[in-house]
Every structure is written in structure tokens, then in C-alpha cells.
Image: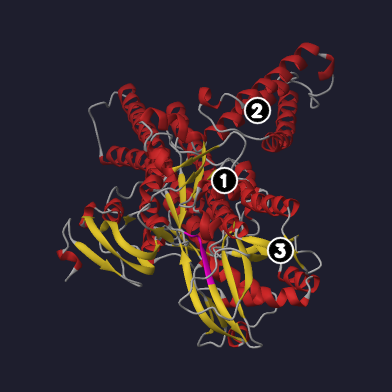
Amino acid sequence: MSIYELLPGDIVHLAIGDQVPADGIFLSGFSVLIDESSLTGESEPVIVNAENPFLLSGTKVQDGACKMLVTTVGMRTQWGKLMATLSEGGDDETPLQVKLNGVATLIGKIGLIFAVVTFAVLVWKMISQKWLMGTTFSWSGDDALELLEYFAIAVTIVVVAVPEGLPLAVTLSLAFAMKKMMNDKALVRHLAACETMGSATSICSDKTGTLTTNHMTVVKSCICMNVKELSTPDDAYDLRSELPESVVKILLQSIFNNTGGEVVVNKDGKREILGTPTEMAILEFGLSLGGDFHMERRASKVVKVEPFNSTKKRMGIVLELTKGGLRAHTKGASEIILAACDKVINSNGEVVPIDEASCKHLNKIIEQFANEALRTLCLAYTELENGFSAEDDIPASGYTCIGIVGIKDPVRPGVRESVALCRSAGVTVRMVTGDNINTAKAIARECGILTDDGVAIEGPVFREKSLEELLELIPKIQVMARSSPLDKHTLVKHLRTTFNEVVAVTGDGTNDAPALHEADIGLAMGIAGTEVAKESADVIIMDDNFSTIVTVAKWGRSVYVNIQKFVQFQLTVNIVALVVNFSSACLTGSAPLTAVQLLWVNMIMDTLVPLIWFLQAYGKTFFRLHGCSDSDLIINTIIFNTFVFCQLFNEVNSREMEKVNVLKGMLNNYVFVSVLGSTVLFQIIIIEIPRNICKHDSSDIDAMACLCIYRIPRHADCCSIEAHSSVMLT
């Protein structure tokens, strides 16, 4: 029967390897483990039973078998809703495109006004001269040519005013950044994404595989009552050397036999570990201790296996030893296994009864591991009598505790530094994950994402909030755990539309596709990412590293600032050309710059000069500059600051009209110094604090210092010119 023929109310049989064809409810079955990574992005399988009965379309059965009652099919399933979001919305203009279009339109209108007025003034001058000469109604071919020349000058003014070189300049800058970003492990699929990332004010990042390594690892152990941190492979060798050989032997026997995983050699001849992430972490720990998986398996005969049971939260195995005798091993939730133990291996490698002090010590270690967001497992064994048979149940008590291990997905190196760099650059990093709230908060604190005043919330709580509550809550959210794809999509949509944020979203699974599609810039993982995620993304991070995302943002900032430089430069050239021709036309009746000259200036200024800035990489401290949001104007602060400081230096220059050294005696004029100092102070305050009043971006002291240093030689030149002019006049 085809899955397309399923209807609500049908009953479906599911077994290992099957893909769940529709949303439904668990009816009956055993040991059902569901891989929900396609929906949630989390690699740890979910236990489905009567207490947690929901099965979702698109997920896979990793273990067990069951019967499912179909409740929804097609586009009404969670998978269907996920796919529906990919068709929503369209390609919006990037923040920079919006601003540049605004600048180009404004300049074009100003140029058109100047052109019309210039043409009108020139024609009026011509008519006035003809009226004075008494030839108002006598027109010749020369007059027509003169009018045509005036019209050509007017058209040229419009041509010069409109920044034709801007598209070329932007494309050059984006292409250069795109090539450099490829060298930095970032594949740009859409050219505009280069500059959009530079405007990013918020990054919503997945946890697994982006902030973490997506590789579960044993990072702490408590064996022989001693806690050992295992951050490097050398730590495992040190641990083995510290343990008695008898303890190492029984530990490896437990790890390699009481497991659902396998160690195989792939076609390339490399060792590969198969199984659930937890089993893979335990097996890797055993191998790092110097154990041999296949040798341990051959050293004993399996009598009975009890697979992991979600109710008992444990798994067990009975082995027949080569030297005779039977031994049972068990592994599972630390509290449950420890409660089944009445003995423990002490620091000397001796088996001793568990007293009250030992019990408190071990429970404290379990609590400590849990507070660090570690998944804890306890390993134990017991010797059995020879009368045990495969039909008997594996004992539930009387075990000897071998040790406790703490497992987690470690944070990638450099992530904390990258998050701190983002925060200093004005970019807010949020973690959005399908993992549980405690693990998410612990990892977020380790990465530096979750602060004391930040909010961590679960997806089910988030989606129950009203719109008013969401508007108040969203700016404070730093961690969202147990989130569904639609929760992530909703968060991104509100950040973009309600709070005017420029949002970047990272993701690797099909579940991330809606948020990647909704975001201003989608960043998919190149290694762990699915094809659906990559197709929905603007940039593919080839090494799956969060630090590479910061590098992408640096290049984006570089593009943005380089375009700011070009716009400022071109405005200067265009405005000077407009003012010179307009003022000359008004005063003398002729334009000093001909059409050919104007076009030549326009050509060399629009083609060669942009290469100065656009073929230039960012500096080491470049990312400390704050990004630009959608509402920021691209050149306001530069022009505003330059204008004010030009007037300040003009004040100094105007003190003395007949002397070269206008600074002489300036400090003796306390009123002048006070007024000048107060003006500088107020300018710094108005630039740095009330941004919303004057509609500008914040600057920095370095930029102001550079402006002052730049003005000093210009100021000296002006002084010299004025002094010489005074001498000539006298």
C-alpha cells in the first residue's frame, strides 16, 4: 500500500529502518527508538511509548517495532507544515540595496533639479542678451546650436549626478569578498549575502554541530572513587596508568560487551564506530584506554542479552568467561544502577561494601556531572552462580559499581571568543536548539551566550505566549530549547519584521530550512547539512564552524564600509561638479566644465578609483565596528561629523585674518577656548548617545582623531593663503 493512500484512522506497522509515513499515536510495541533529527536537528534518538506516544512524519525508526494510529496526513502533518513555510515570502532587497537605491534616487533628483535650473539660467541669460541687443525675435542657426549646447550641459549634469559607477563598484566589492570568503571556508551562493552579513545585528545559531562538535564524548569519569577530566587523548592514557590492571580489564569487558554499538573497518581501512551517539562515546572511551573491541568480544561467550529498556533505563548482558564462571554487566541511568549496587571498587582497586559516606560521595559526583549538563552513565558488574541459564532474568541488584562516566557534545574551540567578538561588535547571538533546557543553558553559558540578565525558554512555552507577551520577551531571549522548526521560524520572523533586526540563521537539518528561508541571510553547514538546508541557504559554511560565521560577518562589514567610502567620495566629486557648473552658469552665463570634461571625470572617478577600496581586506580590529541596521543611513554620521568639525576649524581660522600663525595667543582667550571645547564635547555627546534624535550612527574617538589630524594641514594651507591674500590686498 502506498503512503499516499493513508488516511486518518489507519493502523500502520513500523519496524527498524522504516520511515514514519504520517503523524500518529503509538498503540503498542517494544523498545521503540525514533530518530527525529530530520525535524528537531538533535541526533539523540527519542523513546516512544505509552507515556510519550507521538510519532511524527519524516522521522525514522532506529530500534524496536510498534503499531501506530494515523492522525494526520499530507500537508497537515508537522513535516507538511515545515515544507509549506519554504514557499512563503520572496526575495527582499538587502539592507544595503535599499539604502543605495535611496541615495541614488536622491542624487538623481538633485542632479535633475540642478540641470533644469542650470539650463533655465543659461537660456534666460541668452534671451536677456538678445533682448538688450534688440534681437529677441531674431534667431539663427548659431542660436540653435548654443541652445543645444546648453541642453547638452544640462543632460551631462544629470549623467554626472547619477552614480552610474555604483553598481559596478558594489559588484566588484561583493565579488572580491566572495572569492576571499571561499578561501576562509565559506561558499557564497547568493552574491548579495556578502554585504547582508555585514549588516547582521542578530545571529540565531543551532547548538549541535555548530556551537558544538556534534560528536558525543566522555569528558569526565569517576573510577575507583576518583574523578578524572578527559579533555585530551593523553588524559585517557594517564587514566589507564593510574588504574590497577584488574580494574582496567573489567572496565573494558563491560564497555565492549555490554553495548549496542559496533567497531568496524570501513572500505578505506579506517576504524569506524557505529551505534547511537551515547554508545559511540562509550566505545571511543574504551578504545582510548587502549582496549581492543574484537579481542574483548572473542574472550568471552554471550549467554544472555537484555537490550536497553526505557522503563528500567538500563541494559545488561551475561558472559561466560574463558576461565569458567559467569559474570553479568549492567549499564544505565546512574541513580538507578547505583541503587542496584551494594559494593564499589575503591581507590586501591579493591571491592568493598558501599557505606553511607561512599554513597553520598558517588551521588554528589552524579549531581555535579548533571549540573555541568553531562549525560551520566553508571557501569557495574556481578559474579553469577554456574546454575544461571538463558531463560533466567538478569539480576536487578547485588552489583559492584565499576565507575561513572559523564558524556557531552563538547563546545568547538574558539566559539567562546567568537561569541564575545560578536557581542563587542553589536551582534546578538541566540541559541535555538531542540535539546533539553538544562543542557542548552549549560552549553550557552560555556559559549558565553547566556548572560545573567538573559532569558532561556522552552519552545512549548514560547508558542503559548500572546503577541503582546512575545514583543516584550523576544529581545531578552538568548536561549530557546526544545524548539520546533516553526518556533525558530516565528522567532526569526518577529526579529525581522517587528524589531527591524538583520537576522542571520545557522542550520544543518531539513528542519532548519524554514528559518533559513525566512532569515535575511541563511547559513547552512557544509559537512553535516542536508541538501534541503543548503538549497535554502545563502552561504554554506564548509567547516561547520561558528568561528567561520564571524569571518563571514567581517567580510560583510568590510564590503559595507568600502561602499560607504565610495559613496562619500563620489558625492564629493558630483556635488563639486554640480555646484561649479551651476554657480558659473548663474554668475557668468556659461559652464566652465564642458560635457566631454564632465563625462571624462565621471568615467575615471567611477571606474579606477573604486579599486582602491574594494580590493582591500579587513583589518584585525575591523569587526569591533558596530553593524548597521535597516534604519541606519549609510553616510549621515560621516557628513554630519565632517561638517561640524570643518566649522570648528573655521572658527580657529577666522581668529586672525592677517597672520599665518592663527594659533598664537589662542589659549589666552579663555572664552574662545571654552566655547570651542564645549562645542567639541557636545558634538561627541550627540554622536555617541542620542542616536535616534539626529538619525545617525555612533562613531568612535579614533575616527574623530583622524578627522582632526586630517584638518590640521588643510587649516595651515588656508592660513597661508589668507595671509598672502592679505599682503597682496595691502
Q: Give coordinates of residue 373: x percent, y percent.
A: 60, 52
Q: Give coordinates of residue 293: x percent, y percent.
A: 60, 82
Query: Which residues are the magenta region?
Result: 312-316
Find numbered disc 1 in the image and state the secondary structure of the residue it sits on: helix
- Find out whether the residues at labels 3 and 2 contact each other: C-beta distance under 8 Å: no
Upstream in the sequence, badge 3 or badge 2?
3
54 to the left or right of 719 = left
**Which residue: 31% across, 37% down?**
147
Q: Give coordinates of residue 698: x percent, y percent.
A: 59, 33
Task: Return the residue at label 2.
Answer: 645
Q: Looking at the picture, tell me which residue is in the foreground, 31 or 143.
A: 31
- Find out whether the residues at labels 1 and 2 contact each other: C-beta distance under 8 Å: no
- Which circle, 3 or 1, is nearer the viewer? 3
Q: Looking at the picture, tell me which residue is in the foreground, 47 or 581.
A: 47
698 shown above or below 255: above
Upstream in the sequence, badge 1 or badge 2?
1
Task: Return the residue at label 1.
Answer: 441
**Label disc, if present, on residue 344 of the rendered structure:** 3
Q: Give coordinates of residue 543: x percent, y percent.
A: 55, 66
Amino acid type at circle 2 is: Phe
From mark 3 to mark 2, how far is it between C-alphas?
77 Å
- Which circle, 3 or 2, is nearer the viewer? 3
Mark 3 crowd level (few <14, some 14–19, many ≥20, 10 Å Cα): many
Number of numbered discs = 3
From mark 3 to mark 1, how far is it between C-alphas?
33 Å
In the rendered image, residue 707 lying in the magenta stretch gets the answer no
Mark 1 crowd level (few <14, some 14–19, many ≥20, 10 Å Cα): many
Find numbered disc 2 in the image and state the secondary structure of the residue it sits on: helix
Amino acid type at circle 1 is: Lys
- Which circle, 1 or 2, is nearer the viewer? 1
**Which residue: 38% across, 46% down?**
489
